[in-house]
Image (cartoon, rainbow, N blue to C red):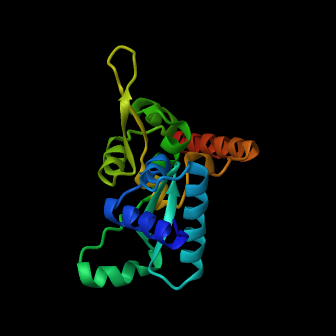
Amino acid sequence: MEIKLIEAQIEAILFTIGEAVELERIAGAIDHDEETTRKLIHNMMDRYEEEERGIHIIELDGAFQLCTKSEMYETIIKITHIPKKHVLTDVLLETLSIIAYKQPITKLQIEQIRGVKSDHAVNKLVEYNLICELGRMDVPGRPILFGTTEEFLRSFGLQSLDALPIVNPEKVEDFKLEAEEEMQLKLDI
């Protein structure tokens, strides 16, 4: 089958589904192996990025999605009148970072790391679809386990959680010292 036709089929699948589609499903639909399908999609991704287009294909944990480029956001807002950008405060970003790096994690574990209640932050992140319930821990009380969503990956331009920046251990120690000093200052006041 001609490559242009296969690419058109892939484009139609991604457009119609409207969310991330696993590589194996796309390969099955176009009657090709996963390796060939991945190469075709990556070629399409490269062309979309090179050309002046309002859309692109992103990869999310072994799945692919056709999306509007973020540079088009302001134009889209003019027609939809419904801005969907959520403002992530420092508290939300801090909580989201803890969840991203420590998942699956309970609210109590988040609060132990942060040193303050995190109900509001966790609820907001669930509302923004950046985190979700992954299940329950098998201990008394069965606390909810939280983790990041596909929307988290999409929002931060990550292909998978493996793409999260690696935190330098020396920086972690610096952060711990800063936090301890800050806590001591609060206790002295």
Where residue 22 appears, as percent x and y from the top left, is: 45, 49
Indicate the position of residue 98 as horizontal and vertical percent values.
Answer: 51, 43
Nearest the viewer among 24 and 184 is 24
**Could you say which quadrant of the image residue 142 lies in?**
top left
Q: Residue at x 32, y 46 (%)?
A: 120
Task: Note whether 71 is above or below 67 in the view shown.
Answer: below
8 or 173, which is in the foreground?
A: 8
Is residue 126 toward the left or the right of residue 28 in the image? left
The percent position of residue 127, horizontal first and vertical second, equals: 29, 51
The answer to whether residue 91 shows anywhere in this view is: no
Residue 143, compared with residue 72, is above or below; it is: above
The quadrant holding residue 173 is top right
47 shown above or below 128 = below
Which of the 4 image quadrants contains residue 133?
Answer: top left
Residue plotted at (68% across, 48% down): 166
Q: Position of residue 172 (x, y in %)?
A: 68, 43
Q: Residue at x 52, y 53 (%)?
A: 32
Left or right relative to 82: residue 3: right
